[in-house]
Amino acid sequence: MSLIHGADGAHRRSGPLEGVRIVDLTDSSGRLAGRMLSEMGAEVVRVRAGAAGAPMTTVPGGLLDWWFDGATVPVPLDLGQADDRQRFLALVAGADVLIETEPPGRLAGLGLDAARLAATNSRLVHVSLTPFGASGPRAAWQSSDLVMAAAGGILSVNGVPDEPVTMWGRQMDNLGGSYAAICALAGLQRVRATARGTHFDLSHQQVVISCSEHVLMFWWWPDVFAPIGAPIAARQASVHWSRAYEVVPCARGFCMVSPSAGGVPELVAWMTERGHAPVPPDDPADGSAVIASFMVALREFAIELDATEVFEGGQARHVPFGEVLTVPEVATSPQHVERGFLRPVPGVSDEVRVPGPFARFSATPCPPPEAPLLEPMTPGDVATLLRRWSSPVAPAARTDASASAAETLPLAGVRVVDFTHVLAGPFATRVLADLGADVLKVQTDVRAVGGHANEYPYFAMWNRSKSSITLNMADARAVAVLRTLVEQSDVVIENFSAGVLDGWGAGWSELSSWNDQIIYVSMQGAGVDGPWRDYVTFAPTVHALSGLTALTGPAGRTDCGTGVALNDHASGLAGALAVLGALEARRRTGRGQHIDLSQFEMASYLVGPALLDWHANGREAHAAGTRDAFADPVPNDVVRAGDGAWLAITARDDDDWCRLAAELGTGEDLSTLDARRRRRDEVHDLLTTWAAAHTAAGAAELLQAAGVPASLVQTAADLTENDPQLRHRGWLIEMASPLFGVQHTDRFPAELHDADGTELTITYRPSPYLGQHNFDVYAALLGLDDGEIAERIGDGLFT
């Protein structure tokens, strides 16, 4: 049976990435990249067979086959064989992108190092995702999803004080795959501009650190956050770092509650009606005390009501409440049903529903999901594919051989009008800015207060390297100014409530009439339509509604959830990826488009395998502490060491266990996975006893020297002061800041090099003060002189 679609051997697909060719040589740490890119229409050839996962009950294949590989073409090659290496090089020669997760040095040892691949294809975008980066004292360290959570700091805040837990579904791997996909498409934009390839040396550890939300913020601004635990952020179950969000028990179920957003007066009235008015603290100017008092009243209020009543009543009053939903409840969410998020697979039993897409493109919609190709590829199929890939999809541009081109960042020349706030949207535009885009942060002094103020550390964390301009959209003249900006820009991105830009007279119909090449990204909480379109959401809200909260915690609990705003980071990465996909589509079609990115759908996408498993097989996922969601290796555990610090350890297979048992000095009778699963508690006790005789850092060094994945559960202090690998990578930089004197930040997690080896230097700028760039931007784009700009500041337009 031929596995290549189409009479000419083409796996024809539509979507934003139609015609883009990608070679996928990833393991689980980067596997999501191939899924997201193929979902957008790229032709993805998967060279390494991935883990199948638990068998499906209604169709052939495994759960992970269906989740990750439904639209990819399998071409399994053994790179240890000379003939297969030649086939691999032939694929690379015809590809736009190679994404691989090979251990540092392995490809070089096979004669397939970055220089050889670039010589084979000078326009190749080569993304290398490795656990700790391609070089450095820990480049050879082994990893797992759990170990990456420990090494990257997230495990230090995820779980309860005496039990670190992992996020369900290998979320560190999902973050790594998302970044790998972004690097792939960013490099492709650079190829389109210069016809020069790029190598991305992407550190999974740095990926995780970049998504650790408040871990570094507490360390860098200890005085600001001392009342809530700084400088070292703690594990505190569902309690948000601000103490203003928490999952509380209800008469039935649990609900995430928070006294935030615009509906607080209506919430207070509702609570007062039921006899639970918040009691003001002795010092009403003490913000922490005000929040603490309010949360006490909310707990007393919620325990008397059904969780659904609390959720719906809160949303009716415009506060960001979210009921903690189980996987079956998420699968039947009215928002998902109305928007068709769980999609049937053409030609397959209707019981199989695949969540997605992660974003909706108006002009180049993502193609429907496909069944995975499970049979081995025939030699004839491989030969047909190689012949087709030997011909370019489109005529190649002439290579720009100038020195300046060799140093050009991927998104140089792309301008973004950024209306986003809080974390998800700003994180998307931070990534775009890091990669060279000119990001104009459009602000107003009315909104830039409190947690949204430029001088507040949370704003500073996500808004480096952007230009702040002020524009009062309540002024009738503002739309004309915005139009001039849009006419000279490539992207507009916002995460307001649905319909805000329409209310300004600057919705999609207006934006596209002003500039038919504009890409407009809407990042609403639940999407631009559907019964929940007007719901108020923050990350804890969508975590609860999507199943992330119920799935992440100690076994038997549904009220713990994630310790960081995982979905804000994931949605930000998805937003950046969607922009890059739309830029590629625009190159082909000549037109922009509207992108509807629902943060609720993105959170549900992160637990996509659980939703797929429930729909197709009737298997419900549950929280399970540190157990891996898909393979259940034993151990995949966290134990306390003799110095009181925590140590994460994974034995990925029986060989890992043999090496681990040699260090333990016992456990030879546990040499099979089945035995270790049956005696899971005994394995945990062996690790606990052994770790008690070591420091966590020392134990990790011993185990890694033996080839066993392990890491100290690192805090901000460990990351910034004690990690030799991060020091080698130069991940931490200081910037002179007009707001803070010195502002610290972490580098983009990849090091970039041109195909000729020239390093591409990312220049970081501190987060701006409000309106810092008014004079520069309005002079350049509106043609105003300083006096005219000052006049508009004075009369309230540029405020």
Image: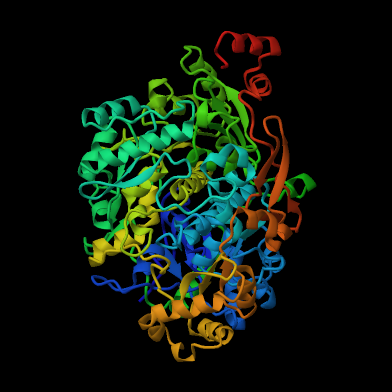
Q: Quadrant of the N terminus?
A: bottom left
Q: Is residue 631 left or right of residue 130?
A: left
- Residue 119 appears at what percent x and percent y? 71, 65
* Front residue of 559 and 343: 559
Q: Please tell me which residue is depicted at 50% across the width and 56% down the height of the picture.
A: 175
Determine which quarter of the picture holds residue 755: bottom right
Chosen colour scheme: rainbow
- Residue 417 appears at what percent x and percent y? 54, 31
Q: Is residue 150 left or right of residue 49?
A: right
* Front residue of 305 and 582: 305
Q: Please tell me which residue is depicted at 47% across the width and 48% down the height of the picture.
A: 574
Q: Residue furthest right?
A: 403
Does residue 557 lie above or below 103 as drawn?
above
- Residue 12 appears at what percent x and percent y? 41, 58
**Residue 197 shows up from this direction:** no
* Front residue of 719 and 206: 719
* Front residue of 24 and 601: 601
**Residue 728 shows up from this direction:** yes
Does residue 241 lie above or below 665 as drawn?
above
Number of marks drawn: 0
Q: Is residue 325 left or right of residue 32?
A: left
- Residue 205 appears at what percent x and percent y? 59, 60
Q: Please tell me which residue is depicted at 39% across the width and 45% down the height of the picture.
A: 540
Q: Residue furthest bottom?
A: 669
Q: Quadrant of the C terminus?
A: top right
Does residue 271 lie above or below 604 as drawn?
above
